[in-house]
Structure formats: C-alpha cells, structure tokens
Image (cartoon, rainbow, N blue to C red):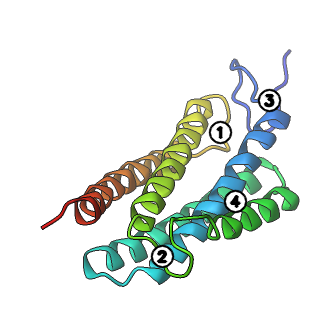
C-alpha cells in the first residue's frame, strides 16, 4: 500500500514543497515590489487617460499578491519576511533612479515604469502557470482560482500594453 502526502492525489507525482517554497517566496518578493510600484504609479500619474487604469491595476495587483499569500498558506509554505522586506526596499530605491532629470520626473518615466510593471505581470503570469501545471498533483491548488488569476494577468498585460503604447506615442512623437 502506498501512502500519499497531504494534498497529493494518489497515483501522481508529489510536489517538492521545499523547492516550491523557495519559488513562491521569490514570486512573493516580486509581487511585493510590483504592488509597491503599481501603487506609487497610481498615486503619481494624474493624466486622465492613465490615472484610472493605473488605479485599477494597482488594486488588482495588490489583490493578486494577497491571493499568492493565501495559496502559500494553503500549501503550508511560510512567507520569508527577509525576501519581502528586501523587495520592498529595492522597489523604493528604484524610485531614485536616474532619469535624465535632477529635480522633476522625465517624460520617459511613465514609459519605463509601464515597461517595468509589464515585466512584473509577465513574471506573475508565469508563476500562476507553474502552479496551474501542478494542480493535478496537489488538490490544495484550486484549478478554477488559478485559471481566474491567469485570465486576470492576461487582461492586465493587455491593459499595460495599451497604456505603454499610448505613453510611447505621447512622449516620443512631436506635433
């Protein structure tokens, strides 16, 4: 008779929880940085074509981070506070980057920030895809929830691409 680990479906391969813990904590660090950046962007860009979509994205990205924490708790994976803290500090330090202007923001700031945020959402989508691929081996992973998170990440990518193209055209075209 074979026994399976809690959450493991009989007859399937087991999820390597220790490695998954490292992987998900790395994603949590990225989610922390992405949430901070999205909230900062939402608060610092008041231009109407960008303000509301950025506020909505910031709210969704924060909800996605909360979903990741909930999934980690369900898997019995503790959040590594040092990784979360380091990511938060790195995101805040990233705000000090050189942008070609000493005092006020460069017109390119919005373009670069949108590209940064898009890369973060692409990474998040890959994390959801990884978890979705493990759901058949571990019944603690909710396939429907992961499908919903994937769909939302895809919508976020579409929104970010629309905003990015709009910002590129606004900043880099004359006349």
Residue sitting farthest toward the left: 175
Q: How far apart in space, not on screen, are marks 4 and 2 (Cα)? A: 34 Å
Where does label 3 land, which residue? 16
Graded by Cα atoms within 10 Å as few (under 14), some (14 to 19) or many (20 or more), the crowding at tag 2 reads few
Q: CA distance from mark 1 to mark 4?
A: 17 Å
Residue 139's mark?
1
* Horizontal and vertical percent position of residue 88: 73, 66
For disc 1, the neighbor class at 10 Å (few under 14, some 14 to 19, many from 20) is some
Contact (Cβ within 8 Å) of mark 1 with mark 4: no
Q: Is residue 103 left or right of residue 168?
A: right
In the rendered view, tell whether residue 10 sits above or below residue 145.
above
Point 54% across, 76% down: residue: 40
Instruction: Give the CA separation, mark 2 to mark 3.
Output: 45 Å
Q: Mark 1 or 2, which is nearer the eye?
A: 2
Q: Residue at x 50, y 48 (%)?
A: 119
- Which tag is nearer the camera, tag 3 or tag 1? 3
- Mark 2 or mark 4, which is nearer the start of the sequence? 4
Q: Mark 2 = which residue? A: 105
Relative to 11, is 74 above or below? below
Residue with the mark numbered 4:
69
3D distance between C-alphas at marks 3 and 4: 18 Å
Q: Mark 3 vs mark 1: which is more N-terminal?
A: 3
Secondary element type, mark 1: loop
Q: Is disc 4 placed on a helix, strand or loop?
A: helix
Q: Earlier in the sequence, mark 2 or mark 3?
A: 3
């Amino acid at each position: 008779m074979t026994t399976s680990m809690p959450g493991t479906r009989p007859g399937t391969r087991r999820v390597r929880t220790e490695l998954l813990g490292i992987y998900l904590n790395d994603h949590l660090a990225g989610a922390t940085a992405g949430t901070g950046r999205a909230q900062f962007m939402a608060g610092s860009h008041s231009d109407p074509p960008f303000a509301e979509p950025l506020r909505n994205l910031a709210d969704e990205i924060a909800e996605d981070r909360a979903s990741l924490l909930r999934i980690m708790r369900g898997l019995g994976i503790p959040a590594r506070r040092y990784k979360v803290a380091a990511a938060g500090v790195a995101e805040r330090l990233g705000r000090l980057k050189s942008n070609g202007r000493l005092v006020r923001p460069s017109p390119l700031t919005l373009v670069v920030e949108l590209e940064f945020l898009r890369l973060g959402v692409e990474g998040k989508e890959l994390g959801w895809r990884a978890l979705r691929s493990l759901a058949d081996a571990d019944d603690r992973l909710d396939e429907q929830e992961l499908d919903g998170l994937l769909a939302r990440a895809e919508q976020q990518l579409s929104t970010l691409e629309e905003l990015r193209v709009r910002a590129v055209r606004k900043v880099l075209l004359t006349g």
